[in-house]
Amino acid sequence: QVQLVESGGGSVQAGGSLRLSCAVSGTTYRPYCMAWFRQAPGKEREGVAAIYSRAAVTNYADSVKGRFTISQDSAKNTPYLQMNSLKPEDTAMYYCAATWRVGACNREAANFGSWGQGTQVNVSS
C-alpha cells in the first residue's frame, strides 16, 4: 500500500525559509505527477505546486510564484518544496499528493489519489 509521509514543517519568522520533503513508500514505480497542497483554518485547500515527474515540468499557484520551488529526487520518488521569503499568510497545513494515473499534471486535488497526513508550517510576523 502506498504511503506518503511529509516532513520539514515548523515555525519560522517572516522572510525565513523551510524545505518540505515527502517520503513515498509501498511502490517502486515513479509517480506520474506529484504536488503540494495547503489548507489554513477556515480556508479552502489550495494547490501550491505540482511537478510532472518524467520531465520535471512544474506549475505554481500565483501566490507562491518566485518564492517556492518544487523539485524531485527521482531515485527516491521524493518530492520537495523549498519555501523562501515566507509570509504569515503561508501559515497552513501542507500536504503531499501523488498520482500514478496518466493525465493532466496540475494542482487539482481530484487528480490525486494518494495523500500524506500533512506537516504544519507556521510563519510569524
Image (cartoon, rainbow, N blue to C red):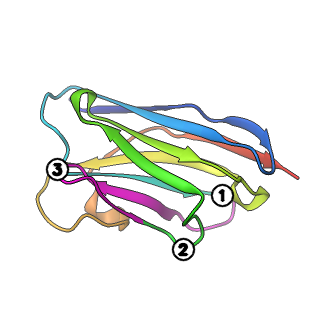
Sequence-first tag of 2 and 3: 3
Q: Position of residue 112 (x, y in %)?
A: 28, 56
Does residue 80 show up magenta in the picture?
A: no
The residue drawn where x is 36% and y is 48% is 97
Q: Nearer the viewer, residue 1 or 4?
A: 4
- Label 3: which residue? 54
Mark pair 2, 1: CA separation: 17 Å
Sequence-first tag of 3 and 1: 1
Count neighbours of disc 2 (C-alpha within 10 A) and say few if under 14, some if 14 to 19, many if 20 or more: few
Position of residue 21 in the picture relative to residue 23 (left or right): right
Query: Considering only vertical position in the picture, is 43 above or below 7?
Result: below
The residue drawn where x is 25% and y is 64% is 105
Residue reaching furthest to the right: 125
Query: Considering only vertical position in the picture, is 80 above or below 113?
Result: above
Viewer-nearest of discs 2 and 1: 2
What's the mark number on residue 40? 1
The residue drawn where x is 73% and y is 61% is 89
Secondary structure under the numbered disc 1 in the rendered image: loop
Labels 2 and 1 touching (C-beta < 8 A)? no
Q: Where is residue 32 in the image (x, y as percent from the top left)?
A: 18, 51
Sequence-first tag of 2 and 1: 1
Given the image, on which type of amino acid does mark 3 rest? Arg
* Residue extent of the magenta highlight: 41-59
